[in-house]
Image: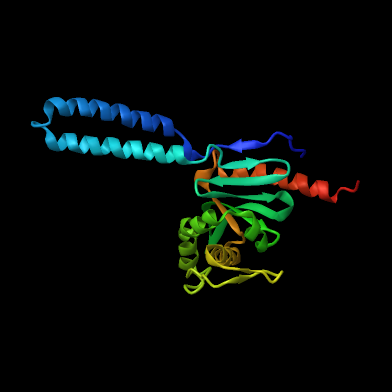
Amino acid sequence: MTINNTPIRIKAIARHHGLFITLTGLCALILVAWCCSYYWQQARFPLLFMVLACLVTIFIGLLKLAEPIHSLILSPKTLIFNHRHGSWQFSWHQIRNIHSVTNTVGITREELNYVGIKLNSIEDLANNISLRLANRMIHEQKPLIQYCIKHQLLTFEQGILNFEPYVLTSGEIVKGPLAAFLHHSEVLHQALGAHLFIAASNLNSSINDFVYLANNYLADEKQFVITPK
């Protein structure tokens, strides 16, 4: 399949209805404030509860609006992931495969709410992810670590956050949160077969639909590389 040169931009489900929720909370707050001016003495506690509910609604709406406009951008050359704490970007030739994350428990096949991305080399992470996002992903992916420990895909010791320096094949030593993320990605790759994970909330369709779309780009890149000039 040949991919169109126009990039595909994906708006995350997590951002949906952010403006509507924020405006709804603001309008409700104005209405409750008007009621407070007349009925505060008679209904102080219910009105206070409604004010707090309005503030929570506004806060949720603002959190949604804080998400990037496009969480994922797929172009013929690159796959880009945007997060409010940073981004990562890889060219298709750096990616080995993209798949839905699953695990077989007994005779049951469990589907986790993540897309898994396996890189040709874990070391590509060191140069293609922002430090803030690497640090954030360690915490956001704790449920994956906990799942792997629970189902004995990892030992408890492997699930402990590892801040030891990470030595690249070039001899370069990576330290700090980035080193911790590299160790984190390494153990998750051992357990689930992927170095990077995209949560379903960052998509605007089903996981299988995104995997199909992304693999079309990946297949097109491989075809381009293999086909002689």
127 or 19, which lies in front?
Answer: 127
**Looking at this rendering, what residue extends furthest in the left direction?**
42
User: Which quadrant of the view contains residue 26?
Assistant: top left
Q: Position of residue 98 (x, y in %)?
A: 65, 52
Left or right, residue 121 beside residue 53: right
Identify whether 137 is placed above or below 170.
above
226 or 184, which lies in front?
Answer: 184
Left or right, residue 150 beside residue 184: left
Left or right, residue 61 beside residue 27: right
Residue 107 appears in the picture as rendered: no
**Looking at this rendering, what residue extends furthest in the right direction?**
229
Q: Position of residue 21 (x, y in %)?
A: 38, 32
Q: Position of residue 167 (x, y in %)?
A: 64, 71
113 or 60, which lies in front?
Answer: 60
Q: Position of residue 90 (x, y in %)?
A: 67, 51
Residue 96 appears in the picture as rendered: yes
Residue at position x 8%, y 31% from top?
42
Identify whether 173 is placed above or below 108.
below
